[in-house]
Image (cartoon, rainbow, N blue to C red):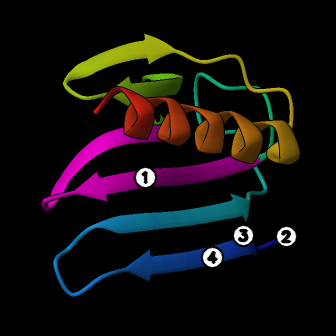
Amino acid sequence: MKAELITRFRDISPTGDGIELVVWRVPEPVPPTTHGYKYRLVYIVGGKRVVGFDNERGKGDHFHLNDAEYTYTFTGIAPLIEDFLTEVEKWKSAN
């Protein structure tokens, strides 16, 4: 099985602000994860990532808020997108 694109959405303004979501179903889990997805969800303001969720090889599932990084418990694509959008709204409310 080859990697299969599940979703790709990008909405970036001319100023560089916006969101991008990319989710792939992969034939083998990305170590150290045990699920079959590779993903990157990012909210950018002023050309800088302020909220991001990803599962980088060697790090596993995690998310970024400003310059801090936290462990994330992946339970599925729908909850991932919901969690990401919730963090974006919380960031917007605080800034």
Q: Which residue is mark 4?
A: 8
Badge 2 density bin: few <14, some 14–19, many ≥20, Cα 10 Å: few
Circle 2 SS class? loop
Residue 73's image quarter?
Answer: top right
Q: Are marks 1 and 2 in contact (CB under 8 Å)?
A: no
The spot of residue 17 in percent (x, y) is 27, 67
Is 7 placed above or below 68 here? below
- First to last magenta residue range: 37-53
Q: Residue 8's quadrant in the figure?
A: bottom right
Three-letter residue code for mark 1: Val
Q: Could you tell which of marks 1 and 3 lies nearer the N-terminus?
A: 3
How many residues crowd mark 1 within 10 Å: few (<14), some (14–19), many (20+)? many
**Earlier along the polypeptide chain: callout 1 or callout 2?**
2
Which of discs 4 and 2 lies nearer the camera? The answer is: 4
Relative to 72, is 4 on the left or the right?
A: right
The residue where tag 1 is placed is: 42
Q: Could you tell me the amino acid type at mark 4?
A: Arg
> Could you tell me which quadrant the N terminus lies in?
bottom right
Amino acid type at image mark 2:
Met
Mark 1 or mark 3, whichever is nearer to me: 1
- Estimate the spatial distance between the alpha carbons at disc 4 and disc 1, rounded to whole Å: 12 Å
Regarding mark 3 in the picture, which secondary structure is present there? loop
Q: Is residue 54 visible?
A: no
Rendered location of residue 33, percent (x, y): 67, 26
Q: For the residue labelled by badge 4, is the local secondary structure a helix, a strand or a loop? A: strand
- Please name the residue that numbered disc 2 is placed on: 1
Spatial CA distance of label 3 from label 2 is 7 Å
Kindly identify which residue carries mark 3.
3
Which secondary structure lies at badge 1? strand
Cα distance in 3D space between marks 1 and 2: 27 Å
